[in-house]
Structure formats: structure tokens, C-alpha cells
Amino acid sequence: MAIRFPIYLDNHATTPIDPRVLDAMLPYFTEKFGNSASRQHQFGWEAESGVELARKQVAELINANPKEIIFTSGATESINLALKGIALAYSEKGKHIITTQIEHKAVLDTCKRLEKWGFKVDYVQVDKYGLVDPDEIKKRITKETILVSVMFANNEIGTIEPIEEIGKICAEMNVLFHTDAAQALGKIPIDVQRMNIDLMSMSAHKLYGPKGVGALFIKKKMPKIKIVPIIDGGGHENGLRSGTLNVPGIVGFGKACEIAKNEMMEESERLKKLRDKLQDGIMSQIEDVYLNGHPERRLPNNLNLSFDGVESEAIMMGMKEIAVSSGSACSSASVEKSHVLKAIGLNDDLIAGAIRFGLGRFNTEEEIDYAINRVVEVVNNLRNISPRYKLKKEATKI
Ligand SMILES: *Cc1c(COP(=O)(O)O)cnc(C)c1O
């Protein structure tokens, strides 16, 4: 099959909508356009039944009860609702929160806000693979601790955290446990019951669903988890998230979860093979390339490599027909070095030379073969003209 350019290898940033998801959504823009809160007529009932099916589909993917799912505008909003909502509801009990240094900005910036509001936040270190040590979490829990928030899988290096162990510790010590599962959902198995997860943030657009929709799982348990809503209004979603529901988006999210439930195992095996091929293809042909993240405990679709002596921006410029991302995030004005790569102890050179490949459902083997050749070619070319790399090589020869 001929390759269609550009090749998309940035599936951690977002994924395209699966055509089956789009088909499920379309009627909800036109014939079934009702407001799911309209209880008096057919239009409302139809929209409501679409939403309730989606709630079931999301719940089934994570072994939850549909009543435990609150729809939001995405993982960022879910995280804000979980962290701020818990902080405000439990501030009488204590003002201490534990999280990690490698969380997504949605968690880190929310925690910074909470610090401004008078909460104390511990940012736990990770090891060189990006793994959190559950004992480190345990040691930091005090009587004042109201919440532990650790991401399920990292969006840059793919490392999968020991969520079940951390969940067990939190349950034993009676502290609420939230996890940001935006990257893990639909990629690796999640069981909120077995893993003792109290709250979990999810996003549709990372698993072939639409953008601008997500959910927060809130465990039904005794005593009931209290959350102060961030958005007040008509009392939708149990009063936790007011505002007319994004019915087509929610329907698409549900369908995406149903597909993931049925196909995740097969798909992750296929993507892991392709990812390993990409990794071996590059690393066997060029030297001074380093794997970032855990060699085994990582998402099957993730590959993060540092190319010593070259800038990732230059690599990307050299292969514009392949969409990947670099180890630095351009935030509005400044170029900021990846806090994740810093936290795992990479030096500035290796951060500057980091490329993240994110494979997805629609990538083909031909695309991977093409990408291997291009990466090797571009990196070799850049190193040939890089005085920094040559000097370094000569210095190490002595
Ligand atoms: C994408 C992502 C988010 C933000 O999700 P949105 O739905 O885009 O708000 C949060 N955390 C992680 C780990 C992510 O990958």
C-alpha cells in the first residue's frame, strides 16, 4: 500500500477519530439533537439514552459502575475537578497533597494553584526510568494528607506507574487516590476496583474519540467521597458538572471505549511489535542513541529516544513529512525543557536531542519502515555537519 504523507507518529498528543466513532456520533448532531436534560419529550429521551449508553461503555472499560462516571470536557477539566474539588471538600481534615514530578501540566499547574490557596503539595521524585516508588508515597502520608495523585502512564516516556501498589497503600492508610489515566485508557488494562482507584481522569481524544470530552470516575463508597464542584449551574451530572452535555462527543467517547475494550489486546500487541521494530531499526543503525523511559514497563505505543549531539528540532526539520514531537514544549513565548526528562536525570544535551514517537491504530508497517530509514538518514547527516558531535567523538577516543 502506498504511504500517505505526512505520516502521523504523534498519537500521545491526540489521535484521529476512528470512523466507527464518527458514525456513532453523526446522528446526534442532526436527527437526535435533543438536550439530554429535556425530560418531557422524545428528543430529550433519545439524547439521554445515547449519553447513558456511553456512560455504560466508559464504565465497562475500567470495571466501574456507570453511576461512577461524570462527563466533562476532557482530562484537564476532570483533573481540576478531582484535585480542587477534593481539596475544597476536605480542607478541614488536612491540607496536604502528594503527587509526582512527572505529572502532566494539568496536574502540576492545578497543584501550583492549590499551593497558592494554602495547600501543601509534595512532588515525589522518580527513578531514572520514570518510576514512582510506592514506599516513597507511603512515607510521606501524614494525618494531614487528603489526596494522592499519581499518573497511570506518562505521556512523554510511556512509563507505567505501580498504580495497584499505590492504590493499596492509599486504601490501607485511608487517603483518597486519584490517577490521571489519559494515556493509559484503552491502551492497557485498567480495573478501578482491583487497583483501589478512588478517582480517575480520562480523555476521549487520546483513544480515537473526539476532542473536548472526557470523564471523571468517582468511586461510590462509604463514607461517600465529597467533591466541591468547579462549575455550578443546572445541576447536571449529579450537581458535580453543570452545563448542557456534549451529547455527540459523549456518544463518541462511549463508542471509542467499546472499541478499545474489544480490540485493545490485539492492538497493543501489534503496536508493540511495530514500536520495537522502530526502536531496533534506529538503534541498530546509529550509535549514541538512548532510550528514555522504562525498557519494559511502558506503553506499547511509546518510543522516546535521545540522539546525542543533535537537536531534536533539527531532526524534525529534516523530516517534515513525519509528525513526531520533541523533548521540549513550546509554551507560548519560551521554549521550556521537558520537566519529565529533567526528572529522570537527563543532561541538557540529551533533553535537547529527544524525540517522542507515538504510534497509533492507523499506522502501518510501511510507515514504520519509512520512518526508520528517514530518522537514520537525517541523524547521520546532522552529525556529519555537527562540530559539537565530532568534537565529542574525538574527545572520547583519547
Ligand atoms: C492529554 C493529557 C491530558 C489532558 O487531556 P485533555 O483531554 O486534552 O484535557 C492530561 N494528562 C495526560 C497524561 C495527557 O496525556
Image: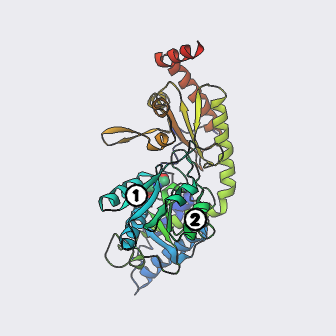
Quarter of the image where the N terminus is located: top right
Disc number at residue 121?
Answer: 1
Identity of the residue drawn at 41% across and 60% down: 212
Give the amino acid at mark 2.
Ile
In this rendering, the count of numbered labels is 2
The picture places residue 103, in percent across and down from the top left corner, at: 46, 52
Identity of the residue drawn at 55% across and 13% down: 394
Closer to the N terminus: mark 1 or mark 2?
1
Q: Is residue 181 visible?
A: no
The picture places residue 208, in percent across and down from the top left corner, at: 53, 56
Disc number at residue 184?
Answer: none
The picture places residue 344, in percent across and down from the top left corner, at: 52, 41
Q: Check disc 2 and report the residue beneath it.
A: 169
Disc 1 to disc 2: CB gap under 8 Å: no
The picture places residue 368, in percent across and down from the top left corner, at: 62, 37
| Residue 228 in the figure: left or right of residue 277 | left
Q: Is residue 238 visible?
A: yes
Identity of the residue drawn at 39% across and 63% down: 80
Identity of the residue drawn at 57% across and 24% down: 377
Compared with residue 332, is residue 40 higher up or lower down, i.e. above or below? below
CB of mark 1 near ligand 1 (< 8 Å): no
| Residue 240 in the figure: left or right of residue 267 | left
Q: Quadrant of residue 56?
A: bottom right
Compared with residue 338, is residue 177 higher up or lower down, i.e. above or below? below
Give the amino acid at mark 1.
Val
